[in-house]
Amino acid sequence: MPESEFKKPVDSEEEIKLDSGLIYADWSQGSAFSGYPARLEVGTVFVGNGAKIEISGKSEGGKKFDKIKDTINANKYTGEIDIPEDVEPGDMIWFEVKLSANSIDGESSRIPVYPAPLITNMAWSAQEARRGDVLKLTADVERVEAGTEALVTILEYDNDSAHDKIVEIPAEIRDMKLELEWEYEYHEDADELPTSEEVGRYGGEYNPPEYFFIIDIKGFKAGAGQESGLLTFKDYIEIVLRDAGNVPKADERYVLHMPDGSTRDGNLDSDGKAREEGIPPGHVKVEFPDMRQVDPPADEVEQEETQGGEEEDGEDSEEQSGTQQEEEEGQSGGQREDQEGQAESQQEG
């Protein structure tokens, strides 16, 4: 890195020249793989935006690489250079960097080349996950030694490719297989998931949380194209209905209006309770279509929820006179009390 020494008076305006320099040029991974690109990075100082940069790959075995000709901005360049398929395993490679207009040149450290791992049959043990489920992630891995370390990254899928990293889990390759277990939990507020009605206003579709995983072995990555398949989050909800005297409303018919636009109906049991499994996560409306109108004081409805979204009774009961609502704030699984026929109850996930 160039050094500058300022010896002019500090009480006057002076002009000085700052010399450009190379801070570092190195690989972004500890090894490379025949026939696959390797990531690299170059850092400079006092190099103007748009300066031309040239990078050439080299190998101790004499193999020639394609050159990179590009421009550098903000004193940093990141890119990839293709490693030829005929580079022998064990060969050491490096790259040279030149910025001719700035009189800068240098070279990177050396890293070994290995045969590319063959990773196939990436899969989840199930297609759907519920809170607390323990899932197994598996893949077949060839061309690596037993005990080789791998890093598995689980991501939440995004339609626009802005995938969110959920967790990184270290693993080892044993008997040409990768296997690990992961307990699924959903820690976000499910009530904030957009419903089909909300996204439909903008031409979109309801999309529940979905997940895939990537395997990284010494910088070689597999799974970015969702080869593992997408794991879909499914939730559940519990409903409890009682009158003002705390007497269960047995066998009351209900209709669930799901966030994906579907519906599901059923009847409460003799204790005024119901539990629905495998529902789409998000805002759920609960309707009791056969519930009679009452004069004040109205019967009370207590709903015990663990679904993670927001609930509403249906429109048939939304505008009844003399109804009031009392809510008890809490986490998923807490209790809320509404008057019979009241349209809304809140849930926090």
Image: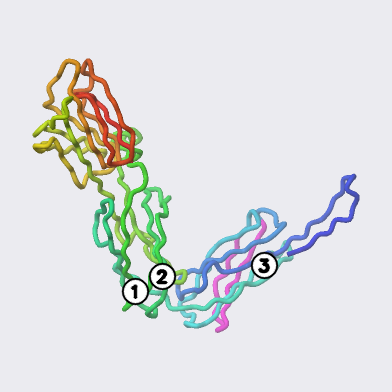
Q: Position of residue 189 (x, y in %)?
A: 35, 41
Rendered view: 6 above or below 199: below
Residue drawn 39% across and 74% down?
117
Identify the residue at the far front of this view: 245
Q: Position of residue 230 (x, y in %)?
A: 30, 55
Q: Is residue 316 visible?
A: no
Q: Amino acid at mark 3?
A: Lys
Q: Closer to the camera: disc 3 or disc 2? A: 2
Circle 3 sits on which residue? Answer: 98
Q: Amino acid at mark 1?
A: Val
Circle 1 sits on which residue? Answer: 141
Q: Position of residue 192 (x, y in %)?
A: 35, 38
**How far is mark 1 from mark 3, CA to CA?**
39 Å
Residue 46 location, quadrant: bottom right
Q: Closer to the camera: disc 1 or disc 3? A: 1
Residue drawn 41% across and 52% down?
163
Q: Quadrant of the C terminus?
A: top left
* Magenta region: 51-70
Q: Is residue 153 highlighted in magenta?
A: no
**How far is mark 1 from mark 2, CA to CA?**
10 Å
Rendered view: 191 above or below 222: above
In what element is the residue under mark 3?
A: strand
Residue drawn 57% across and 82% down?
60
The reply to whether the C-beta atoms of the residues labelled 1 and 2 are less than 8 Å apart is yes
In what element is the residue under mark 2?
A: strand
Other-residue count near label 2 (Cα within 10 Å), few / some / many at <14 / 14–19 / ≥20: some
Q: Earlier in the sequence, mark 1 or mark 3?
A: 3
Q: Is residue 116 left or right of residue 45?
A: left
Q: Residue 150 bears which disc, if any? A: 2
